Every structure is written in C-alpha cells, then in structure tokens.
Amino acid sequence: MFIDTLTIQIFFLALATALATGLGALPFLWVKHPDSRWIGIANAVAAGLMLGASFSLVLEGTHASGWSTAIGVALGVVFILITRRVLPDHDQLTIGGMSGLNARRALMLFLVMTVHSFAEGVGVGVAFGGGQAIGLMIAIAIAVHNIPEGLAISLTMVPRGTSVWKAALFSIASSLPQPLMAVPAYWFVEQFKPALPVGLGFAAGAMLWMVFSELLPESVKESHSTRLTAGVTMLSTVAMVAFTFML
C-alpha cells in the first residue's frame, strides 16, 4: 500500500492521541501520599470515568448497529473472564512498583484500556476515510478524551506506590494501538466499518466488568462508605458523559 503524506499525518495524529493519555498522570505531581480513604475515592472516580466512557462507546456503536454492539459487549466480558483465568496468580505479579492483588488489578485495567484503544484507533482511521476535516476533528476529540482515561489508570496505580512517570508511561502504552490501527483502518475503511460497533461494544463490556467486579468493591473497602463510593462514582460518570458530549 502506497504511503502518502496523509497516511503519515494520520499516523502521527493518532500517536499524539496516545501521548495525550499520559497527561492524565500529571495531577499526581501534587498528590504524593493519599490515605486509604482517598484511595477509595480514587477508585470511585476511576469507576465513574470508565462508566461514562462505556456509555459513550455503546451509544456510538448503536448508531451503526445495536446488535453488533451488544455482541461486542458480551465478547468483551467473556474476554476479560478468560484473561482473568489465564493470568498468573497475583502472588507472582509485580508491575509498576506494585505486587499482589494491586498489581493484578492494575494489569487488568491496563489490558482493558488497551483493548479500548484498538477501537479508538479504528475510529480515527475510519473518520479520515470520510474526509480530512472530520478525521482531524475526531482525532482531536479522542486526544482530549484520552486524558481522563489516563487519569483513570493513574488513579489505580499512583496511590498504591507507582511513580507518576511510570503511571504516565503505562497510560501512554495502553493507547499505542491507536496509531497502529488508524492507518490500516484508513486504507481499508470499507472493510473496517462493519467491525467498528463490535469493537466499541467489546471495549465497553471489558470496562463494565472491571468497574463492577474490581473498582467499586475496592472503593467501598478502602473508603468504608458505600454512600461515598456511590456519590463519587455518579458525579464522575456524569462529568465524563458531559465531557464526551461537549466534544
């Protein structure tokens, strides 16, 4: 396939969207050692951001195909359940300065966000297939949208001992599928279009599983308050949905 100037521009724009994810770790430059209550709140914020993102993904997917999106959601849950079984025992895991259950939870979140990034990369490429103006607008929107996603990753890592720069690198790494998928999706836009709602649903299903099986129970445990967890999660969800609609 001939690599023209636009193809190169699409790759670097998608790479910029991935780099933007690392900005989500920056608030932790001013928050060094939160106590357990704040760790619980951080989990609730991360859960809310992911719930808001999942809602947006499902909504976007259903515009193309409701059934394909629903199938994608189911496949996303199945994928995470299988991944959970094949991962090594938490006692053998170390990641980003964390070990044990914290490392396992962080790895699962990293995998979920990475899966999500495949769909976003396809979205960028497909958008450029509809013209440069709309492609650029979608790329910018995804870049801005990636910042709170990087924050969600950092919220589950930095309070448990991971350094800010490592959390930023993990956030960026989770979005690297975006430049890898954007170019093929642009080249073969008609072939990728039918798969996009499945991919969006897949990412949403994986994130929903992570929210309800990991983040929310951990938030209640650390904050010692179901009411606080529910309130913070709800506010974060509303903020993420509102943020997405503004884009």
Image: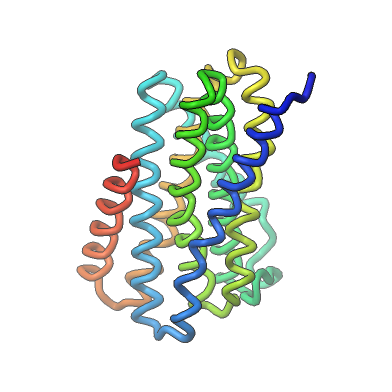
Q: Position of residue 67 (x, y in %)?
A: 40, 20
Determine the residue positioned at 47% across, 86% down: 33
For this view, does 62 lie left or right of residue 24? left
The vertical placement of 161 against 230, above or below, is below
Q: Quadrant of residue 184?
A: top right
- Give the quadrant of the N terminus: top right
- Is residue 171 visible in the rendered structure shown here? yes
**Which residue is nearer to you in this view: 195 or 78?**
195
**Which residue is nearer to you in this view: 71 or 241?**
241
The vertical placement of 152 against 73, above or below, is below
Determine the residue positioned at 30% across, 58% down: 236
For this view, does 178 lie left or right of residue 236? right
Q: How is the image coloured?
A: rainbow
Q: Position of residue 186 (x, y in %)?
A: 63, 23
Q: Position of residue 84 (x, y in %)?
A: 59, 52
- Is residue 74 visible in the rendered structure shown here? no
* Residue sitting at the far top: 190
The vertical placement of 141 against 134, above or below, is below
Determine the residue positioned at 54% across, 63% down: 105
- Give the quadrant of the C terminus: top left
Q: Quadrant of residue 44?
A: bottom left
Determine the residue positioned at 43% across, 26% down: 69
Q: Position of residue 142 (x, y in %)?
A: 48, 42
For this view, does 58 lie left or right of residue 169? left
How many numbered circles are shown? 0
**Which residue is nearer to you in this view: 207 or 79?**
207
